[in-house]
Amino acid sequence: MKMHRLLAEAAAGLVKSVFKEHRVLDHALAAAFEANPKWGKRDRGFVAETAFEVVRWRRALAFLADSEEANALCAAQWTRMGYELPDWWQYRGARADDIRGREISLSDQPRKIRESLPDWLDELGESELGTAWDAEISALNRRAPVYLRVNTLKLDLQAAMAWLAEAGVEAAPVPGVPDALVLPEGRILPKPLREDGRVEIQDAGSQWIAPMVDPQPGEMVIDACCGAGGKSLHLAALMRNEGRVFAMDVDAKKLTELERRAKRAGATCLRPRPILPATVPDFAGVGDRLLVDAPCSGLGTLRRQPDLKWRLKPAQIDRVRGIQRDLLTTYPEMLKPGGRLVYATCSILPSENRGAVDGLLADGGFRLVEERVISPSAHGFDGFYAAALEKI
């Protein structure tokens, strides 16, 4: 296969911006697509696959190419993809035959090379997960499919499958996740369907979190770290719009986006609220259920954002652990006695998960009801943790 020079240069430019300027890959890719509206589906696919896979396999590709230069990493990735390396592609590294030859010995390299990890992150994963780290990081290096959550305020699973099929989108149920559908590998959901409100893009593992809150119709439920609101919308659907879901966040822009999503989803019980200094005292002792989907390292989402492992620093993980402790010290004040708290993260590190919960349990105000570790290697989803506790 042959490559288009402008597309190759665009892909390499994206890689350089991620590694040298620490740009978020998703944002950089979206900007590139917006700046090049004439790119077709195949063009966008080539640029996206190159950028994502070079970022995902940075150290493995550096071994294959015998170079850390971005152009050489791209050359190694294109060789893996079956492309001919053209004469006009300039890079300082191994040639195609050498790259293919070195692939044989890649499996003999240390895990940090073959799984493409910074040294410190490989050491942290092993120290926290032990022998399970091998399987987890291997699973997190696989490409993630697109999962959908059917909005049961509008239709059921079978009706959603039929609606998508009419639009030319094949989707299959996900065993064990009642409202989830998965698209075939490499397929994305067209924008008109994404913005219709009948389905939401949400990882299947994430869809296990809101049911652990066990919200009942008529109750007051607080989602205290709602972000863009995927779990808030799920809570509203589980409650059949009966009751109130207060969706809170410190970022007002996210709440504006949530209002738009709630309107299209028909989630009329949703009440977006900014987190202000008076918020916790104002809501003290009123919530029947409280979800604290805490800020975290995000290491459970590496399938979807492989650039995160190069942007993260040890100090950032220390900082989010402190935030998690603070949230579990203050936010439970909003819960009634006997109310249910669910603490959740999208991390696979026990120190961010059960470690944080143990700190809360040690204070004596809660008892553990259930917990769930959502493992990329065991379940095939993104990595999550959730613990449900009852306020004594």
Image (cartoon, helix red, strand yellow):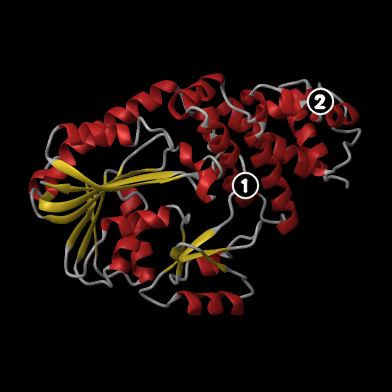
Residue 187 to residue 317: above or below: below
Residue 144 to residue 349: above or below: below
Residue 149: x and y in percent read 45, 64
Sequence order check, earlier mark of 2 and 1: 2
Residue 302 to residue 261: above or below: above
Q: Is residue 311 left or right of residue 264?
A: right
Circles 2 and 1: CB distance less than 8 Å?
Answer: no
Residue at (63% x, 34% y) in the render:
55
Q: Who is closer to the viewer here, 83 or 214?
A: 214
At mark 1, the secondary structure is loop
Q: Who is closer to the viewer here, 148 or 140?
A: 140
Residue at (75% x, 37% y) in the render:
9
Tell me the quarter of the picture where residue 52 sits.
top right
Residue type of the residue flagged with mark 1: Arg
User: Which residue ends up furthest to the front in the rendered image?
Assistant: 131
The disc label shown at residue 174, or none: none
Q: Is residue 104 left or right of residue 273?
A: right
Residue 296: x and y in percent read 37, 36
Residue 380: x and y in percent read 54, 50
Residue at the spot of label 1? 143
